[in-house]
Image: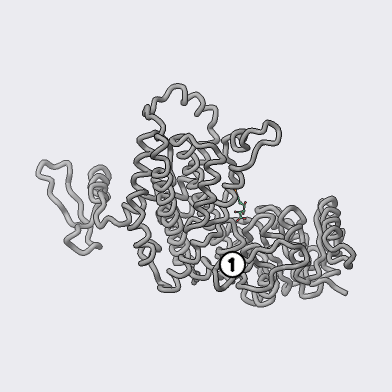
Amino acid sequence: SLCDIGFIGAGVMGKNLILNLADNGYRVCAFDLDHHRLEDLLEQDRLERGEQPARIETCNSYTELLARVKAPHLVILSVPAGAPVDDVCNKLLDAGLKADDIVVDTGNSLWTDSVERCKRYEGRLIFFTTAVSGGEVGARFGPSLMPSGDPYAWARIEPVWHAMAAKVDPDSGQPIERFEPGNPVKEGEPCAAYIGPIGSGHYVKMVHNGIEYADMQLICEAYDVMRSALEMSPQEIAAVFREWNKGPLNSYLIDISAEVLGTADPETGSPLVDVILDRAGQKGTGLWTAVSSLEVGCPAPSIAEAVFARSLSTRKVLRTRAAKKLLGPDVEPVPAEQRETVIAQLHDAMYCAKICIYAQGFDLMKLAAREQGWQLNFAEIARIWRAGCIIRAVFLQSISDAYERDHKLSNLLLDDFFIEQIAANQGNWRRAVADASLRGIPVPALSSALNYYDAFRRESLPANLLQAQRDFFGAHTFSRADRPENEKYHVLWSRKDRPMVKV
Ligand code: 6PG
């Protein structure tokens, strides 16, 4: 009999998505230009299913793939973002793909590329996208899925995505985690929801990654303060993270950070973190988020700082030279009896900064949605991030609740729950940032979030002076606070009497 789904790309993510589909009873025909990957996939299927019949088929060409899959075809791509997506679409068209066949791109594609592709292939195939978060394990046992595109395609894909996605226990709001091949989680709320028109799903995933960058940077800063100011060992810091994981900071990223810090280098036996070179990599999604925030004019400084922190980390040679030349404060490490106090400060600082980072990310999605005409459901977006994805955290339930209370909430910082949380914890946040700065420890995410909060809550900002400066050197004009804003004024600065004219 024919397969339900054609799947192209059996790399790490592809292979795991295929096995996930097979677990959920879908018959998949897989194709990859690299034969070894297909052999690997079949081997994994053999290992997992034991005596049961094969669940996955492989094939040797695009034409064969189409012949072995039911029409109208549903073909899922897991290929590198960029040119390979178009390459595969064109090959599928050459192989006879029809106008009512659906192609789903699951890579980390740039959202504007998805919009263009949808136009480019219109009338020749239905180009749909689904952004996937959750890494290898998520792909295998339940990712968070952010689909977008043609609603007709969504109606066909929805049951498949609901089956594959991570699930949340509706009572506790916690992920249902069961990592057993052949025994997928069927109960609970699926972390897959239709996001909107083409482009919107990948935009939302891009912002997810921007938040991911900032979340990771925050954890690294807390680690750095504990390491540098408190002189704690990685194991001791791991214990703090494990403790934090029981409260409002509970998240997958805190959890894995504790795991990492508790791990030793197999070669030397020293803590693994100590042997890892401190140059951070990046594949682009955090950068895209920062660029987009600048373009739409949405302040998302902590996300941008997290990208800059990665860039600065790569300048290791320069930093090593500067470390020998540039002076900083000469401060004694924190005495042992104050350790608990400083750890508590860091905890509260992390929590407040985290709220601000999510406020920035959600605000960005809101502004972009307005610009693009998308109707994004923020309560739902927060809900599908509660499990499966990299930023999964209990905290996302509170965000979802905030948007349930007020669908039109203009910024998370204005939700009553978050107002209270920051009010209660900001003293420690300020102390943590001030102390790190006095000690010369960089905390760009913690401090930019604090600056964001303080600027956000100021009715007046020094932009009045800035407008005057612009008018002074460039006759850029300004509005008066005591007149309608659309009336523009200019001062004739070069004249001694400096008269003001209405322009
Ligand atoms: C996810 C991750 C995933 C990937 C990022 C990391 O949600 O599963 O975000 O998409 O790991 O692209 O990217 P960097 O290499 O830029 O850190």
Tag 1 residue:
198
Give the class, few, some or many, for how many residues have Cα within 10 Å of label 1's Cα (few <14, many ≥20). Answer: many
The residue drawn where x is 9% and y is 44% is 497
Residue most extreme to the left: 497
Query: In the image, is 354 to the left or to the right of 427?
Result: right
Query: In the image, is 488 to the left or to the right of 93?
Result: left
**Would you identify the image quadrant in which residue 120 lies?**
bottom right
Q: Amino acid at mark 1?
A: Ile
Query: In the image, is 304 to the left or to the right of 496?
Result: right
Check the image and tell me how it is coloured.
Answer: one colour
Q: Note whether residue 119 is visible.
A: no
Task: Establish if 348 lies above or below 140.
Answer: above
Quadrant location of the C terminus? bottom left
Where in the figure is residue 218, as x and y percent of width and height? 48, 47
Where in the figure is residue 369, as x and y percent of width and height? 47, 66
Where in the figure is residue 346, as x and y percent of width and height? 42, 46
Residue most extreme to the front: 337
Where in the figure is residue 123, as x and y percent of width and height? 68, 71
**Would you identify the image quadrant in which residue 154 lies?**
bottom right
The residue drawn where x is 46% and y is 25% is 322
Quadrant location of the N terminus? bottom right
Q: Secondary structure at mark 1?
A: loop
Q: Is mark 1 within 8 Å of ligand 1?
A: no
Residue most extreme to the top: 325
